């Protein structure tokens, strides 16, 4: 898989174990216009069965993670919509920004961390390991980026 630059908060850069990444269309519940943007991390909407949503602040191992949005969702305030999501059954490797670039040190590698969302922007909360789910794979202090593994919870897809 080659890296794909998205306009959103994260970029997909690979998968684990060489598993091919797959794109699937998921339903998004009405309530907001374009509630998921290209590059957002996506989870199962626990409040609305059969739907997905943008992962919120503090999203952790209690959420069912799906992958990264490859398109903007087309939901509106009054109509359900859909979104294209890239996922990999073995885990999706994504690159994003940390909440604090100064925390990008060897000590965070291989730890499980959570997601931070401020003003709609998703970042890796590299110093929050409580109920962590995103595995820190690598970081780049020059670019101020962090690579994490997103576990894609779709057991029926191989």
Image (cartoon, grey):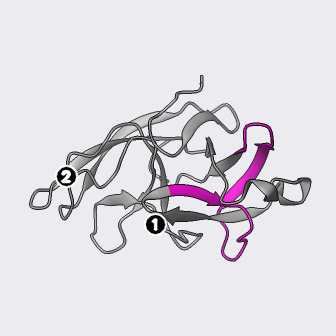
Q: Disc 1 vs disc 2: Cβ atoms closer than 8 Å?
A: no
Specify which label sits upstream in the sequence, 1 or 2. 1
Numbered label tally: 2
Residue at 68%, 39% in the rendered image: 16
Please identify the residue farthest to the top as the structure is shown.
Answer: 2
Label 1 packing within 10 angstroms: few (<14), some (14-19), many (20+): some
Q: Which span of residues is magenta-colored?
A: 122-145
Whole-percent x and y of residue 97? 63, 49
Label 1 SS: loop
Q: Is residue 35 left or right of residue 8?
A: left
Whole-percent x and y of residue 92? 59, 43
Residue 75, label in figure:
2
Residue 133 within the magenta-colored segment of the rendering: yes
Q: Relative to 55, is 86 above or below?
A: above
Please identify the residue farthest to the right as the structure is shown.
Answer: 106
Residue at 45%, 49% in the rendered image: 40
Residue at 42%, 59% in the rendered image: 120
Q: Relative to 130, is 39 above or below?
A: above
Q: Is residue 16 left or right of residue 139?
A: left
Quadrant where the image shows the N terminus: top right
Of residue 58 and residue 43, the one placed in the foreground of this image is 58
CA gap between label 1 and label 2 equals 17 Å
Q: Label 1 belongs to which residue?
A: 56
Of residue 145 and residue 56, the one placed in the foreground of this image is 145
Residue 56 within the magenta-colored segment of the rendering: no
Residue 122, label in figure:
none
Label 2 packing within 10 angstroms: few (<14), some (14-19), many (20+): many
Whole-percent x and y of residue 71? 34, 37
Label 2 SS: loop
Whole-percent x and y of residue 114? 63, 66
Residue at 58%, 63% in the rendered image: 115
């Amino acid at each position: 898989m080659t890296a794909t630059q998205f306009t959103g908060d994260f970029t997909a850069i690979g998968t684990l174990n060489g598993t091919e990444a797959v794109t699937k269309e998921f339903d998004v519940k009405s309530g907001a216009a374009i509630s998921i943007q290209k590059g957002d991390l996506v989870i199962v909407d626990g409040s609305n069965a059969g739907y997905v949503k943008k992962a919120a602040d503090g999203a952790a191992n209690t959420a069912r993670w799906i992958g990264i949005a490859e398109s903007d969702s087309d939901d509106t305030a009054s109509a359900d919509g859909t979104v294209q999501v890239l996922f990999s059954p073995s885990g999706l490797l994504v690159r994003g920004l940390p909440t604090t670039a100064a925390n990008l040190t060897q000590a965070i590698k291989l730890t499980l961390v959570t997601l931070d969302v401020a003003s709609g922007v998703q970042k890796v909360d590299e110093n929050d390991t409580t109920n962590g789910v995103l595995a820190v794979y690598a970081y780049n202090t020059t670019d101020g980026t962090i690579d994490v593994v997103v576990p894609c919870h779709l057991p029926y897809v191989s």
